[in-house]
Image (spheres, rainbow, N blue to C red):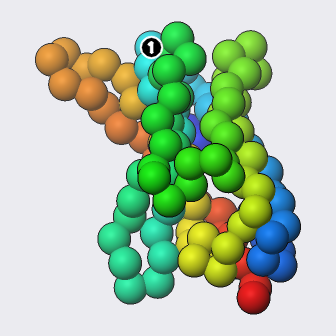
Amino acid sequence: QVQLVESGGGLVQAGGSLRLSCAASGNIFSINTMGWYRQAPGKQRELVATITSDGNKNYADSVKGRFTVSRDSAKNTVYLQMNSLKPEDTADYYCYAERPYGLAYLPSWGQGTQVIVSS
């Protein structure tokens, strides 16, 4: 089992910045990919950004150039720096971790942290 605890959400004005953090504990040694998803009211959960254990990053088109995902392996923590925030970034943000499990991957999710961007 992997436990994920997010922090750093809140209310910010459009154009502002926030930094989300997610600390992993438990069976962390086999974690490969970590990252962030988000879910806005009435919408499906969508990928925001991910980063693999060797540093490869993937971003949703809607956040490229504004958000940066990073990872501190020594602290078992993944970060999401969000700049130039827009009202459409308002959502619950969920930390994600993935580890190999046989021929598949086993996902773990945090409980979510709310981000509200006011116009």
Numbered disc 1: secondary structure: loop
Query: Residue at position x 48%, y 76% from top?
Result: 40
Q: Is residue 84 above or below residue 49?
A: below
**Would you say 33 lies left or right of 81 here?**
left
Q: In this view, does 109 lie to the left or right of 102?
A: right
Task: Please give the residue where the numbered disc 1 appears in the rendered image.
Answer: 30
Of 64 and 11, nearer the camera is 64
Q: Quadrant of residue 100?
A: top left
Looking at the image, is 26 positioned above or below residue 42?
above
Q: Residue at x 79, y 51 (%)?
A: 19
Where the N terminus falls, by quadrant?
top left
- Disc 1 crowd rating (10 Å Cα; few below 14, some 14-19, many 20+) is few
* The C terminus - image quarter: bottom right
Q: Position of residue 43 (x, y in %)?
A: 37, 78
Q: Which residue lies furthest to the front in this view?
A: 65
Q: Residue at the spot x=45%, y=26% of the render?
A: 33
Left or right: 107 with respect to 72?
Answer: left
Residue 78: name its quadrant.
top right
Please indicate, yes or no, whether residue 111 appears anywhere in the rendered image: no
Q: Residue at x 74, y 14 (%)?
A: 74
Regarding residue 28, the answer to whether it shows in the image is yes
**Quadrant in which residue 106 is drawn:** top left
**Label 1 is placed on what type of residue?**
Ser
Residue 56 at x, y percent in the picture: 50, 21
- Vertical order, 12 against 98 (above or below): below
